[in-house]
Image: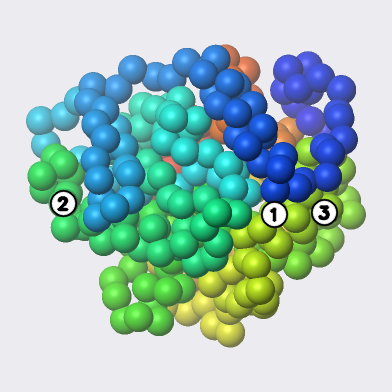
């Protein structure tokens, strides 16, 4: 069941209108308005950079020593969100973890289809590795993470890094990731979420992938032929999320391939819970859990 405080905040469920290209600008505006009303945690140093053409924003808590760095990719169906809309979320993540976080403003569909967002992810990660010392961060402790579509990009990036013979991040953080673009795993029949219906997600896939088949492993990491040789993973799913099995099936695939994986289903939470006000106790608790796991994984590197 959905956490009662979250249910009260969200109100009665409402069906989404069919997602069309004409609706995308309106939904982006609505997301920006919602984000503007969400206060974020105070962080000692926040600064924007150009990461070889990709806009990024560094959130660095106060520290006299180089901090570990989490390169973090926001969600939004590959079509929504930017550094501003997810500023509060990223601030809370940096505050809870005590680590530096680099938000990535990757290009969005439908204007920029696959693999533009993935290309930007790779560019931002490479820039972060080269720029770590100048950012006051530890180049030996850089991880990659994301939520929803950002989790998809994170998983895809680790596959691409492996296949290109490049170093893996220290670990990968996947928060309710999309890993199978068929959107047909059992949780879709078990969990109802009007704002995240299969019809809506099918449209997201169409606008993001274009003519690229859903079976492409860099679009659907779960469908990769092999999952060995990837960074150890933290995979967090939400109980009230149609995409729940995307994360849990992917965790199982990593375990079968011998990848160290911590998987946890968070009870009472919906998809996109990090975009809800931190004043909701269940959201605050989840944020503290995520921050603690990030801190622990960096500390045990």
Q: Label 1, label 3: how many angstroms apart (C-alpha)? A: 10 Å
Write down the quadrant of residue 286 in the picture: top right
For the residues carrying marks 1 and 2, which lies nearer the camera in this image? 1
Of helix, strand and loop, which one carries label 1?
helix
Q: Which residue is mark 3?
A: 198
Q: Is residue 118 above or below residue 70?
A: below
Task: Identify which residue, 282 or 59, lies in the foreground.
Answer: 59
Q: Which residue is mark 1?
A: 204
For the residues carrying marks 1 and 3, which lies nearer the camera in this image? 1
Image position of 241 (left or right of 79): right
Local packing at callout 3 (Cα closer than 10 Å; few below 14, some 14-19, many 20+) is some
- Residue 5: x and y in percent read 73, 18
Which color scheme did the rendering employ for the protein?
Answer: rainbow
- Residue 88: x and y in percent read 46, 25
Q: Which residue is mark 2?
A: 131
Determine if residue 149 is in view.
no
Q: Is residue 215 above or below residue 190?
A: below
Q: Residue at x 16, y 42 (%)?
A: 135
Q: Is residue 244 above or below residue 11?
A: below
């Amino acid at each position: 069941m959905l956490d009662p405080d979250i249910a009260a905040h969200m109100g009665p469920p409402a069906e989404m209108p069919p997602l069309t290209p004409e609706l995308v600008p309106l939904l982006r505006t609505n997301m920006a308005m919602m984000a503007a009303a969400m206060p974020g945690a105070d962080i000692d140093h926040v600064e924007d950079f150009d990461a070889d053409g990709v806009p990024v924003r560094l959130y660095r808590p106060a520290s006299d020593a180089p901090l570990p760095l989490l390169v973090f990719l926001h969600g939004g169906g590959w079509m929504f969100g930017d550094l501003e809309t997810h500023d509060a979320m990223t601030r809370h993540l940096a505050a809870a973890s005590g680590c530096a976080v680099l938000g990535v403003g990757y290009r969005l569909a439908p204007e920029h289809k696959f693999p533009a967002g993935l290309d930007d992810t790779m560019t931002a990660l490479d820039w972060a590795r080269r720029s770590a010392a100048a950012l006051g961060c530890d180049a030996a402790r850089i991880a990659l993470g994301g939520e929803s579509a950002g989790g998809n990009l994170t998983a895809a990036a680790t596959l691409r890094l492996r296949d290109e013979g490049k170093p893996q991040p220290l670990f990968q953080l996947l928060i309710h990731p999309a890993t199978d673009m068929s959107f047909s795993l059992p949780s879709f029949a078990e969990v109802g979420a009007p704002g995240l219906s299969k019809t809506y997600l099918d449209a997201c896939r169409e606008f993001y992938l274009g003519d690229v088949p859903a079976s492409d492993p860099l679009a659907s990491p779960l469908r990769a032929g092999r999952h060995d040789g990837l960074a150890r993973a933290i995979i967090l799913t939400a109980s009230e999320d149609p995409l729940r099995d995307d994360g849990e099936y992917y965790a199982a695939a990593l375990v079968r391939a011998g990848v160290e994986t911590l998987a946890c289903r968070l009870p009472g939470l919906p998809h996109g819970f990090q975009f809800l006000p931190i004043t909701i106790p269940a959201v605050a608790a989840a944020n503290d859990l995520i921050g603690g796991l990030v801190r622990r994984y960096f500390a045990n590197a």
